[in-house]
Image (cartoon, rainbow, N blue to C red):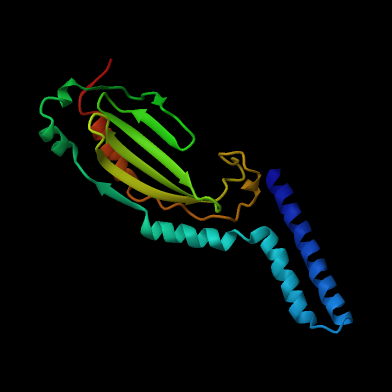
Amino acid sequence: MLGLIVLFAFFVYLLIAILVVLGVARLAREQGRSPRRWGWAAAIVMYLLVFWDHLPTLLLHKYYCATKAGFWVYKTPEQWKAENPGVAETLTWRDRSPPFGHKDVVYRRKLNERFVWEHRRLPAPVLPVRIGTEAIVDTTSGDVMVRRVGVESGYGELAIGSPTGDWRVIKFWVGTEACVPNIHEFGQFREVFKQLGRKHK
């Protein structure tokens, strides 16, 4: 139902835009000015009123995917165990641990007594482009074991809604497919670090 309302609003706006362009062109002709030039100027203004953020979002998304997205392994579980002999055997883990330290842009989940999975999602200040960083962190040393950076864009999905309640979710055309490199490899490392010790019953 919401999709039909948005589609109807789009066609209404398109009709209004056509009438504005034709009206501006006619007015320009009556005043002895170039109707084509003024008509195009009016069309560009009507386009930018709604679609101003479309192309900049796509370009910024592509730039961040090329320059910031990636997957880095700083220390494998085997390397960590070699540097911390006997510690892994003292750790315990659950199938699903509750989150803690949850804030607007930071989400943490305890994997065991030594490691946390940390997820940060930082939005761009103007355009709807978000850089998400996931890391496995040793809480004692503060060292990052594995890190993955992905990029998302758009205001949310029309059928689901915006994660922030933003009304601009109706601009479903803004944004593109997320680039999330090595998502499976990161998940495998997370499980291995989580299960270094014995399972808690």
Residue occupying image coordinates x 63% and y 52%: 171
- Quadrant placement of the N terminus: top right
Task: Give the quadrant of residue 65.
Answer: bottom left
Task: Give the quadrant of residue 194.
Answer: top left
Q: Where in the figure is residue 84, as x and y percent of width and height? A: 13, 30
Seen from the viewer's position, the closer of residues 71 and 45 is: 45
Residue occupying image coordinates x 41% and y 40%: 120
Seen from the viewer's position, the closer of residues 185 and 68 is: 68
Which residue is at the far top?
A: 201
- Quadrant placement of the C terminus: top left
Residue occupying image coordinates x 28% and y 39%: 188
Seen from the viewer's position, the closer of residues 97 and 57 is: 57
Q: Where in the figure is residue 149, as x and y percent of width and height? A: 36, 48
Is residue 18 left or right of 104 when viewed as pictured?
right
Residue occupying image coordinates x 22% and y 45%: 74
Which residue is at the far right?
A: 30
